[in-house]
Image (spheres, rainbow, N blue to C red):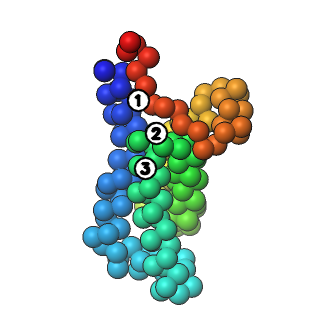
């Protein structure tokens, strides 16, 4: 039973940034999120569609990771989402004040960029595993589950 609880808590720690917090923020502050997305989107409708797409990814893929339903594919989608959002929204290289010492908006954005990539790495480990053979297993059956809540110690 402890192993099942730890498996759940590990997965919860990995997804809780997205579900419920970021997803809830998109719902509660939809117009602000759409306004931010409009800096990249050509039209308000496209900005809203991007936010709704992000909301769907955050909610449904997080639930896939938590429940174990196609969890490897869900983790891969979340990893790609983290990488794309880092590239689109954490562009530290565009900040004019990147400094290693002192106040620096560029350095703050750089740390956020790296955090996105680190979270992506966690999702990639969940999707592919830690070995070449586990990557091959993913490629053979990307919709398969890890069956995270199977307690091998139970009779």
Residue tagged 3: 62
For residue 37, above or below residue 132: below
At label 2, counting other C-alpha atoms closer than 10 Å, the crowd grade (few under 14, some 14-19, many 20 or more) is: some
Q: From the viewer's perspective, is the residue at label 1 or at label 3 nearer?
A: 1
Any part of residue 88 in sight: yes
For residue 124, above or below residue 55: above
Residue tagged 2: 68
Toward which corner of the image does residue 1 lie, by quadrant? top left
Element on which disc 2 rests? loop
Element on which disc 3 rests? helix
| Left or right: 35 as drawn, with respect to 87 | left
At label 1, counting other C-alpha atoms closer than 10 Å, the crowd grade (few under 14, some 14-19, many 20 or more) is: some
- CA distance separating discs 1 and 2: 8 Å
Element on which disc 1 rests? loop
Query: Residue at left 43%, top 49%?
Result: 62
Toward which corner of the image does residue 14 lie, by quadrant? top left
Of callouts 1 and 3, the N-terminal one: 3
Of callouts 1 and 2, the N-terminal one: 2
* Mark linked to residue 107: none
Q: Position of residue 138 (x, y in %)?
A: 66, 37
- CA distance separating discs 2 and 3: 10 Å
For residue 44, above or below residue 20: below
Q: Are marks 1 and 2 in contact (CB under 8 Å)?
A: yes
- CA distance separating discs 1 and 3: 16 Å
How many numbered discs sit on the rendered protein? 3
Residue tagged 1: 149
For residue 129, above or below residue 100: above
């Amino acid at each position: 039973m402890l192993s099942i609880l730890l498996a759940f808590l590990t997965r919860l720690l990995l997804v809780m940034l997205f579900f419920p917090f970021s997803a809830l923020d998109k719902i509660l502050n939809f117009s602000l999120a759409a306004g931010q997305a409009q800096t990249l989107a050509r039209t308000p409708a496209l900005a809203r569609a991007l936010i709704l797409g992000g909301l769907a990814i955050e909610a449904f893929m997080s639930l896939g990771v938590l429940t174990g339903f196609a969890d490897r594919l869900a983790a891969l989608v979340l990893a790609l989402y983290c990488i794309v959002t880092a590239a689109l929204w954490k562009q530290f290289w565009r900040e004019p004040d990147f400094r290693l010492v002192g106040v620096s908006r560029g350095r703050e954005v750089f740390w956020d960029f790296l955090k996105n990539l680190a979270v992506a790495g966690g999702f990639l480990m969940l999707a592919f595993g830690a070995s070449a053979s586990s990557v091959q297993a993913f490629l053979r059956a990307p919709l398969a589950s890890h069956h995270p809540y199977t307690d091998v110690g139970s009779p």
